[in-house]
Every structure is written in C-alpha cells, then in structure tokens.
Amino acid sequence: MRRMLVTGGAGFIGANFVHDTVRRDPDVELTVLDKLTYAGNRRNLDPVSERITFVHGDICDADLVDDLVRGIDLVVHFAAESHVDNSLNDPSPFIQTNIVGTFTLLEAVRRHEKRFHHISTDEVFGDLPLDSEDQFTERTPYDPSSPYSASKASSDMLVRAWVRSYGVAATLSNCANNYGPYQHVEKLIPRQITNILVGDKPKLYGTGENVREWTHVDDHNDAVHRIIADGRIGETYLIGSGDERSNRQIVEKILTLMDLPADDYLLVDDRPGHDLRYSNDSTKLRTELGWTPKYPDFDTALAATIDWYRTNPTWWKPQKTPTEASYKLLGR
Ligand code: NAD
Ligand code: DAU
C-alpha cells in the first residue's frame, strides 16, 4: 500500500492525515487530489510539499480520477462538503461531491481493483436523546437529519453496495466530531476561538445544551491508519474518544482558557433540525485493532488548539470575514 491517493487532502482532516502519513512512512508515495473549495487550502500542505504530488481537481471528474487511480494502490477518501449549516443553505454541492464524487471513485477502484477506505461520520445515524447513555454502534440503522448527513449516508450505502455486488476491497469508518489545527473557522471550536481573537463573543446555537463527542484529529487519523493496515474488508468501524460535552461546556472552557469570564457568550438562533447528541461505541475498533486515543486530556489538547489559532492568524483571517457574513444572513 505504498502508493496512496488521498482525496480532500487540503482540508482539515485530510491535511493532518497527509502530515501524519509522511511522518510514519518515509517511503510512501502520496498523491493528493483536491478541488480547493472554500474549505481547501494549498498552504495546509506546505510542511510536506516536497514529499507529495498535488493534483488540483474534482473527484467527480471521471477521466482524471480514472488516470490517478490506475497508478496507485489505495484511495483514502476524505473529500466532501462537510458543513451542516452550508448544506441547509444549499444542498446541491453536497449531493454532487458527497454522492456523485464517491460513486466516481468507486467506479475507478472497481475497474482497477484497488483498495478503498471511505471516511464518514456518526451523523449518518441521526441523533440520540440528551438524557440517555445510548450509543451508536456499527449496527445502528441509518437515520440522517440534514442534507449533509443524508449525502454522507448515501455515500456509505454506495460503498457497501460496491463491496457486496462488485467485490470492491473497501472499509468504512464513521468518526465523531474532530478538533485540532487547520480546522476551518466555520466549525464550532475554531469559530469561537477566532471570535474571541477578533474581539467578538462566542455564539451558541439555541440553548447550548446539544452534546457532541470530541476526538482529536490525530486520534481519528491513527484509527484510519489501523483500519487501512488491519481492518477487515467490507467492515465499518466507529471512531470516538468517549469524551462527550455540551456545546455550552465547550464554549465556557474556551473562554476560561482564554482568560475571559465563562459566561461571556451569546445565544443565537438554533440550527434547523439540530441533532441533540452524538456518541459512538468504538469497542470494535479498540478490541479488534487496538486503537486508543492518544489525546485523552481534552483541556490540554484544546489549549494547544487555541495556541495554534493564536499563532497562525494569517492562516485563518482570510476565512473569517466571509464565514461570519454567511452566518449573519442565517441569524447565527
Ligand atoms: P473539510 O471541509 O475541512 O475539507 C474537505 C476537503 O475536500 C477540502 O480540502 C475541499 O477542497 C475538498 N473537496 C471538496 N469537494 C471536493 C471535490 N468535489 N473534489 C475534490 N476535493 C473536494 O472537511 P473535514 O472536516 O476535513 O472532513 C473530511 C472528511 O471527514 C469528510 O468526509 C467528512 O464528512 C468527514 N468527517 C469529518 C468530521 C469533522 O469533525 N470534521 C468528523 C467525522 C467525519
Ligand atoms: O459528528 C461528526 C460531524 O461533526 C462531521 O461529520 C461534520 O463534518 C462536522 O462539521 C461536525 O458536525 P457538527 O454539525 O456537529 O459540527 P459544528 O462544528 O458545525 O457544530 C458543533 C455543534 O456546535 C453543533 O451542535 C452546532 C453547534 N454550534 C456550531 C457553531 C458553528 C454552535 O452552537 N455555534 C456555532 O457557532
């Protein structure tokens, strides 16, 4: 599996994956295919630019994808439209990239008989009650709430069908919310850190009681490496640290770590259809593949993430004004 094609490698998780892969394997031949949408940034790959081949292109471009897949051993598929609020505003790029794009890749790996790993999300399962200890498992029925999660659920279904009907050698993983460096400022944690850095208040949707399970991006990518190496073909693995927090707790923690009063935030309009709680049972990944999070101390890892945004304003400032302008139109 030395020749790897990483789709979406200029985005948040994909770029961290590329950095990590280059660190792990000095002999890996890495090609990144990325459309450089508003969420992709070529600079994310600067630290490894000597070690990779970058292709600026669309996963829906069947000829380009066919050419690239022919010359590699494995596709790790991160590319997606990834933000729920954007999907509520305009679902069409989600249908195109997340469904048609995944279909295009699957057809290429089918033709050329290549290994495929599909990156997905716990949002395909819908949500869990706030006041329960229920968890998603690999057997939980799909019940997506938003256009984003419906498009990711569709892409998962395509992968499963291509395994069963065509014998494509694919694995799937569904991870909980990630945090860490290079995350776009549209997402909860970087939005609030950068709001504070520009002198605005953090903004909580609704009551702030919704719960997410937070996994450091390097722990997500470590799980992906384990699945690529030893995961069983056709299987799905859930990834999650077990660290659940309400959005209000997250914002209070960020404010405290940035030396501000913990209640110095605003409540804003809620997200339509807002999922209440996510929680992944990652027992299968832990017992079968020996995965365990290396960032169990959320406060320390969050403080390091805050430091990253503090020391990299030239990275996030160009995103900030357009992102906040879009939120303003939504009342959020
Ligand atoms: P991101 O939005 O930061 O990055 C997505 C990348 O895909 C960008 O570089 C973008 O330019 C590229 N891209 C978009 N459309 C493309 C196309 N048509 N062709 C080629 N490239 C295209 O996303 P992320 O947060 O890094 O998420 C990566 C993957 O992980 C997604 O599949 C997402 O569903 C999944 N995921 C994300 C999280 C999370 O918390 N962020 C959690 C679980 C799963
Ligand atoms: O669970 C995995 C998913 O996590 C991934 O599949 C998605 O790609 C990723 O974007 C993320 O989805 P969420 O919708 O959970 O993430 P987001 O950062 O947008 O929001 C996290 C929570 O915080 C959610 O309950 C909405 C809330 N929120 C978000 C923003 C941006 C706020 O309260 N205020 C905000 O300003």
Image (spheres, rainbow, N blue to C red):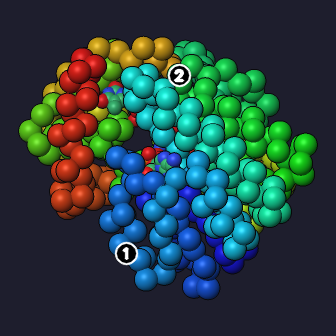
Say which residue appears at 20% left-offset and 50% top-offset: 318
**Amino acid type assigned to the residue bearing label 1 in the image:** Pro
Tell me if 62 is positioned left or right of 16 in this view: right
Q: Answer left or right for 232 relative to 190.
A: right
Query: What is the three-letter code of the residue carrying label 2?
Result: Ser
User: For mark 1, what is the residue?
Assistant: 47
Q: Is mark 2 within 8 Å of ligand 2?
A: yes
Query: Could you classify mark 1 by the number of other residues whose Cα lies within 10 Å: few (under 14), some (14-19), or many (20 or more)?
Result: few
**Which sits in the foreground, 306 or 56?**
56
Q: Which one is nearer the viewer's eye here, 55 or 240?
A: 55
**Residue linked to disc 2:** 146
Residue at the left extreme of this rendering: 199
Question: Closer to the N terminus: mark 1 or mark 2?
Answer: 1
Residue 303, position in %: x, y? 30, 52
Name which residue lies at 72% across and 69% down: 70
Q: Quadrant of residue 45?
A: bottom left
Query: Against 265, is 181 above or below?
Result: below
As helix, strand or loop, the secondary structure at mark 1 comes to: helix
Q: Is residue 251 visible?
A: yes
Quadrant where the N terminus lies? bottom right
Q: Is residue 297 above or below residue 85?
A: below
Q: Check whether the beta carbons of the residues at disc 1 and disc 2 lie within 8 A of each other.
A: no
On the rendered structure, is 105 left or right of 91? right
Q: Quadrant of ligand 2?
A: top left
Query: In the image, is residue 163 above or below residue 19?
Result: above
Could you say where residue 287 lies in the image, as x and y percent from the top left?
A: 77, 52
Residue name at image x 55 percent, y 41 percent: 97
Q: Quadrant of residue 281?
A: top right
Residue 10 image position (x, y, % from top left):
43, 59
Most extreme residue toward the bottom, as rendered? 27
Numbered label attached to residue 105? none
